[in-house]
Amino acid sequence: MAKTFHGGKRAVRTAANAWERQLRATPSSAVGTTVAALLEMWQDAKRTDWQPTTIRDVRGRCARIAAELGYVRLIDLDPIQVDAWLIGMRRDGVGEGAIRGRVQTLRSALSWGVSRRLLRSNPVSDARPRVATGRRSRRPESDQVVALIAAATAESSRAGLALRVAAVTGARAAEVVALRWDDLAGDRLLIGRQRHSYGGVALIREQTKTGGSRRVVLDAGTVAAIRERHAEADALVGAPTDWMLAEAGAAEPPSPRWLYDVFVRAAAVAGVPTGRNRGLVLHDLRHWAASTALKDGHDPVTVAARLGHSPEMLLRIYAQEIDDGQVDVAASLASRLDG
């Protein structure tokens, strides 16, 4: 491997010594590894952990990253090139959502490469590129959630139950639609699978997005609503049914798209604006569950477990609610001091 240095004798010696130290600290197997090769290795290593829709999305992003940076060797990739890549995407008119997805994908792949000693540091993390977070600050008000559930219930007991379960559990849409009647034991609901579609075929994965499963405690009203809908579904079919939110007698659970359509129709009836830019989206019911629990003083560890988050992730996403709660903490402490 050869490298040419320019400048005065002292500057060349300093640069050469720095390069030599870098090579000694880099595994020989990684010296010629390119970004494209790393992306392939990362996908192969993570494939069994990802759901099919994630594999599809990551494959698409990796193909675009490889077309733009694939030829670059890991040893040559630095924050300056990452910045130039970001500028190039914006110059080419790539949307902020797509940019965010590609940056996050490359960051994750490089982090995996660091853990496998293919490179010493993560150039994307070092560059800290300015990209839109995609995180929305809008949260539903409780009266809006109540109105949504009421409107859905007026449509059908099935639709009303779907939105109530989504709001009470804070579960993701793919988790909500995959619930079975036997997931409920007493007031404990097991959330342990997802329903997705891939190539027009329903796919049921026996684990949640973050892996494993979790049990959440339900209120008496939600338990009663589930029991009533179960009896109704069994009576319509004339035999025991399986899926909590499926049409009576359906062999498969409904898709997350069905749940989203229920949400949109209920919002239209309730006069609640929808849409990422000017209104609410279905996932905001999950945000409502988390932010309401935090505002009401429940500890982040318990709230995180209920949503299937790590406490660290919860604190990152809902930092504003926790920060706002400090006003109440200050008042509580002052009340003890001031009587």
Image (spheres, rainbow, N blue to C red):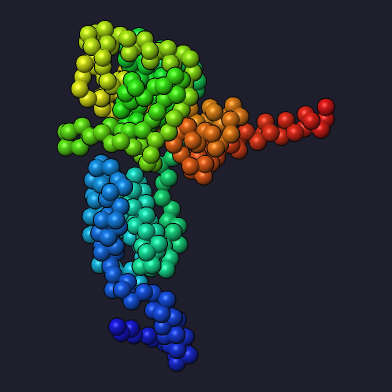
The count of marks equals: 0
Q: Which residue is rendered at x = 49% and y = 35% of the image?
A: 305
Rendered location of residue 16, percent (x, y): 42, 85
**Which quadrant of the view contains residue 7?**
bottom left
Q: Is residue 169 above or below residue 127?
A: above
Q: Is residue 189 above or below residue 271?
A: below
- Looking at the image, the residue that sits furthest to the bottom is 9
**Which quadrant of the view contains residue 273?**
top left
Foreground residue among 2 and 6: 2
Q: Which residue is rendered at x = 34% and y = 30% of the image?
A: 175
From the viewer's perspective, tell me whether residue 58 is left or right of residue 290.
left
Foreground residue among 21 and 4: 21
Rendered location of residue 70, percent (x, y): 26, 63
Q: Is residue 18 above or below residue 212?
A: below
From the viewer's perspective, tell me whether residue 303 is left or right of residue 124.
right
Residue 265 visible to the viewer: yes
Q: Is residue 258 above or below residue 230?
A: below
